[in-house]
Image (tube, coloured by chain):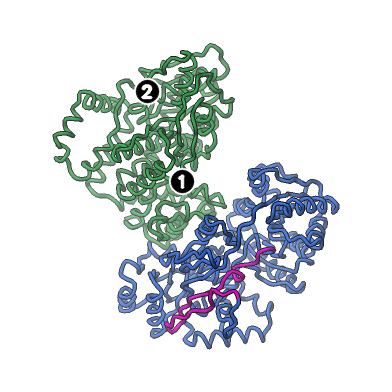
Amino acid sequence: MALASESLATLRGIVGAENVLTQPEDVIPYGFDGTAALKQPAECVVFPRNPGEVAEVLKFAGQNRLPVVTRGSGTGLSGGSVPVKNGIVMCLVKLDRVIQLDEKNLTILVEAGVVTQKIADLAAAAGLLYPPDPGSMKISTIGGNVAENSGGLRGLKYGVTRDYVMGLEVVLPDGKIVWLGSQCVKDVAGYSMKDVFIGSEGTLGVITKVLLKLVPQPAAKKTLLATFARMDAAAETVSAIIAARIIPCTLEFLDKITIRCVEDYAHIGLPLDAEALLLMETDGHPAVVEDEARRMEQIARQHGADAVVVAQSAEESARLATARRSAFSALARVAPTTILEDATVPRSELARMIRFIQEVGERHRLRIGTFGHMGDGNLHPTFLTDERNHEEMERVEKAMQEIFDFAIQLGGTITGEHGVGLAKKRFLPGAIGGASLDLMRQLKRTLDPGTILNPGKIFDL
Amino acid sequence: MSAKPPQLAHLDYSVLQQCMHCGMCLPTCPTYDTTKLERNSPRGRISLMRALADGDLELTEEFGKEMYYCLGCLACMTACPAGVNYAEMFEAARSDIETAGVLDKPKRNFVRWITVKFIFTHPRLLRLLGRGLYVYQATGLQGLVRRLRLTALLPRSLRELEPLTPTVRRHFSDALIQEVETPPQRQHRVGLLTGCVQDLIYSEVNRDTADVLLAHHCTVFTPRLQSCCGSLHAHNGELELAREMARRNIVAMEKSAGSLDQLDAIITNAGGCGSHLKGYAHLLHDDPAFAARAKAWSEKLKDIHEWLAQIGLQRPACPAQPERVTYHESCHLCHGQKVVRPPRDVLRAVPGLELVELPESNWCCGSAGIYNITQPEMAGKLLDRKLANLQRTGAAVVASGNPGCSVQLEAGLRQAGRNIRVVHPVSLLAEAFRRAETGAKKPTPTS
């Protein structure tokens, strides 16, 4: 059933007629996010221009029991911003003001719809760094990053989005606007409520402003690329680097299938018989970078690397990084449907996990390319498949279940940085257990008693 | 109204399905960047095409408008991680729109008939019109009309377009270039495409291209009467006419060179045309008489900069003439053909030129075929953005490898009263070769 025309009239009254979309040609493109094979037609998309309008829309939705799905640029990878039936999609891309870059306190205050890349660029222009760099940062919004607690390539050394959020403005389901956190590095005044909303996937409140911490830009960076004939040699290299008290800013991994796809696509001269490839980067003080790069090269060689290339210039660094940067593109063009997963295990279990994924792929006759963040145990097993092939999709489902079960068995998690949304909902109970799930449900009921915010995502009530 | 879109439904579904809607195209799309609405984005448009192919959406006027709001700049294809063939989908969609007639209006139909279906399918007529326009401009009549404000008598849409009118050259390509020209040292044999618009308003670029080819030891075959490459037709929903243009060009080149086998390469110097010309193999793959010839054609088709890079770009031995130049990338050269570095290398090969990078160099200038005529508002915004970026470079010269871009940039610079010269990279190289030949003498002015 479509939204009643009085409801639409009210929404138009709140945000202005030009900021309410209902025509099929306008709303069909809001029926999905970046997640493969998940679709639900949107009926109505609204674009609030300020937190006040967000509050009014939520109040109205609450009175009428209408579900509201908050969305930024729709690049999520777990279906978190896929519309809910008979609901409103609230798109925050028009909340895109940068309010203040504070160079004294090293913070930046922005509205939720600001694109992550813009924050990174503004920080860089001031000689600062905003470290979280999710793959979609060129277009993802910071509000979406906070709602999903996005990660990126620099997780090991610099942490994830949560580690940079100092404060949030949140509109609660009843329309109240609250400010959580402060510009103080130390602040223990009451519960750390902002942390409740970080990673809440749009189910508890609508984030409208974000105060972020910035750090000084490292003065130097050095890039190395190593290839290995054995997976274990790569895994041992990673362990040895960490054991040598080096925390690289990048420690990325490509498996055999991914290496072949990358070479087919980018022709950078990677050895096709290699089982594993590691891209390593260290950043910081030039002397330290020089020393760490030298030691990492040594460690890689000691642990059986076939070849180690150390970039001598910024251009060469960029060229080496191409191998990792084009991994997803290279895989995605191989098959019509690309399902990107993010099973994550403790670093010590990486080699076992990767071998298991390869074995599962062979057993189910599936193509799974794996790459990911070796430093923080966050892997991206990527299924190259075709959603029209139902029989194959069933095998994909089975394989996925096995991979998640094994990750949990190793003390890992079903999602490192993409979130649960719809895609991982059925795996959540197994991953966290009943008591934790009940606590989450209790929290949801308390903050959103009318269940209007993103219902049916993460878990059912 | 026909609800089933013949072309879109005919496409292999995997072409539509290849889009995984990750959103990486959004920041590179000029229309999305302007409106922030998903329907104005590549993945949004693909979702509409997919809805149409799935039968979830009728082929409506709104759909038609959306597909014509797209510039077809193909920046999305550069950004796409999954290798989606947006160009093919976009042409199929526009073809379906024309077949269904959802945008039919008497005026639109008339204008399309005159231009797409009539003038640009008749090269002799096009040259005749060009000749008429040349006389109008050369006799000073155009200036007089402008001074007397007679343009005010034109209907508004034409009046706004009038300043865009490019200057027609006195001599067209066939008068400037002989059918076969031979260098002293013969290493390669190439066919030269002179284009339709290029032939009238930038015929000297064709002469310059031939000169540069000769300097690179290429024997040059230039068919006398060449048709439009058909990109205008393909981009405007007339795929059948596009096929006809392709056949004609293949036949004309075969006649000039004996056969395509005789040629090492077929050279184009217009980015927009080149992108389409390279696609003849696909366009004619169903045509038994032409499929094999079109395949050979596509394999040999090279943009001039690309070809020079392939055979070894030569640096003219002439005295340096210091000048700051910047490079504007034609969308279909960089996004359509992925030719990015070779034009810059051509500029770097000219002694004395200082190449400064243009911010957002691969962002559409708004010309986009006939987009500046059909969507003047959006085209104007893109032109303003381009002009602002040009200003930032401090360059005296902007090089562009596509006549559509050059017309757009010249008109914009003229209206803004900016003294920046627009030239083809190859013309700068040709000038340098001429300087090298004549020693330190001043170069002969082109056109």
* Residue at 53% from the left image edge and 51% from the top image edge: B80
Q: Which chain is blue?
A: A
Based on the picture, tell me whether residue B67 belongs to the magenta stretch: no
Per the image, label 2 sits on a secondary structure element best described as loop
Identify the disc placed on residue A104: none
Residue at mark 1: B360
Q: Is residue A285 above or below residue A449?
A: above
Pick the front one: A152 or B70: A152
Look at the image and tell me whether residue B296 can be seen.
no
Q: Badge 2 is on which residue?
A: B225
Observer-nearest residue: A79 or A141?
Answer: A141
The quarter holding residue A393 reads: bottom right
User: How many marks overall?
Assistant: 2
Relative to residue A282, is residue A59 drawn left or right? left
Q: Position of residue B96 (x, y in %)?
A: 38, 50
Q: Chain of mark 2?
A: B
- Residue visible at 75% across and 59% down? A362
Residue B147: x %, y % from top left: 16, 33
Give the left or right position of residue B337, taking residue A405 as reference.
left
Pointer 2: residues within 10 angstroms few (<14), some, or many (20+)? some
Q: Point out residue B423 in the picture as x, y percentages from the top left corner.
A: 40, 30
The chain to which mark 1 is attached is B
Q: Nearer the viewer, residue A258 or A347?
A: A347
Chain identifier for the green-coloured part of the image: B
Query: Which region is colored magenta?
Result: A157-185
The kind of residue tagged 1 is: Glu
Q: Is residue A245 above or below residue B9?
A: below
Mark closest to the chain's N terminus, 1 or 2: 2
